[in-house]
């Protein structure tokens, strides 16, 4: 079974702090994603990466950055946390399929971040 | 741009009743379509996916969905709801060569005894 783990389930930070959210997958997947989930808005893509050291902006990248130094690890960084970044953050990974079908994304359990 | 619309942010059914969760997509080309379920305080788990092999797709836990190109729909159904089906359900669409998924806003399913 694919396993995607996130470093914390719950996190409380103060405004202005630098925050690191870590995600690790154990199935050698090329693609990794960071989403934030807010009530009534579904999941919105922040950043994704399709290879080590490669990254692409998603739909809401402002206020975030990412790092992917190793294939299995994808970090989300909040350079200066703000209260409007209070949310549930979900990490996902997927395989780049060599066939016709698109592989699904596998999700971690999420990190609920509160910025006070 | 692709988008997904889920009609009804909350759906309530009685145990044993039919479950119908609606999903419509907009896409310029035939997409890949997915349904995910999220139980409280957990990540998302794949229920089923449509990848053009068959229009009626069967998933886990007795759920199925039918792809209707003419209606640009991919509604999720289950003949008989169980209390354990109470969760939030997300429809997602993607195109193969982008690896990006677009998620709907979610539908919370409540199952009454």
Image (spheres, rainbow, N blue to C red):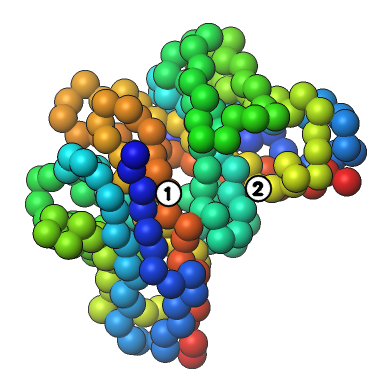
Q: Please, is residue B60 above or below residue A59 in the view?
A: below
Residue drawn at 58 percent across, 10 percent down: A69
Q: Which residue position holds label 2? A: A88
Please provide percent x and percent y for residue A98: 21, 21
Residue drawn at 33 percent across, 86 percent down: B17
Please provide percent x and percent y for residue A10: 75, 46
Please tell me whether mark 1 or mark 2 is closer to you in this view.
1
Please provide percent x and percent y for residue A7: 69, 33
Say whether residue B28 is left or right of residue B1: left
Contact? badges 1 and 2 (CB < 8 Å) = no
Q: Please, is residue B82 above or below residue A116 in the view?
A: below
Give the class, few, some or many, for how many residues have Cα within 10 Å of label 2's Cα (few <14, many ≥20). many
Please provide percent x and percent y for residue B88: 49, 64
Q: Nearer the viewer, residue B64 or B107?
A: B107
The answer to whether residue A108 is seen in the rendering is no
Instruction: Check the residue under mark 2 and report the chain it is in.
Output: A
Residue drawn at 10 percent across, 45 percent down: B53
Q: Please, is residue B80 above or below residue A70 in the view?
A: below
- Have a look at marks 1 and 2 and say if they share a chain: no
Say whether residue A6 is left or right of residue A84: left
The answer to whether residue B54 is seen in the rendering is yes
Q: Which residue position holds label 1? A: B103
Residue drawn at 27 percent across, 35 percent down: B95
Badge 1 marks a residue whose secondary structure is strand
């Amino acid at each position: 079974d694919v396993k995607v783990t996130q470093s914390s389930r719950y996190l409380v930070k103060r405004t202005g702090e630098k925050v690191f959210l870590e995600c690790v997958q154990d199935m050698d997947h090329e693609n990794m994603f960071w989403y934030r989930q807010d009530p009534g808005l579904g999941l919105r893509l922040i950043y994704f990466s399709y290879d080590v050291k490669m990254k692409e902006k998603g739909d809401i990248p402002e206020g975030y950055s990412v790092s992917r130094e190793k294939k299995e690890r994808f970090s989300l960084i909040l350079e200066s946390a703000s209260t409007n970044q209070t949310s549930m953050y979900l990490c996902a990974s997927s395989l780049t399929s060599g066939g016709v079908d698109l592989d699904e994304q596998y999700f971690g359990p999420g990190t609920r971040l509160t910025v006070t | 741009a692709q988008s997904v619309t889920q009609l009804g942010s909350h759906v309530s059914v009685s145990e044993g009743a039919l479950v119908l969760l609606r999903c419509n997509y907009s896409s310029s080309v035939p997409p890949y379509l997915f349904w995910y379920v999220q139980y409280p305080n957990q990540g998302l788990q794949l229920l089923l996916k449509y990848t053009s092999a068959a229009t009626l797709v069967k998933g886990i836990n007795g759920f199925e969905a039918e792809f209707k190109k003419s209606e640009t729909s991919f509604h999720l159904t289950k003949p008989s709801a169980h209390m354990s089906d109470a969760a939030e359900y997300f429809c997602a669409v993607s195109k193969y060569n982008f690896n990006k998924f677009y998620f709907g806003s979610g539908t919370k399913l409540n199952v009454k005894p």
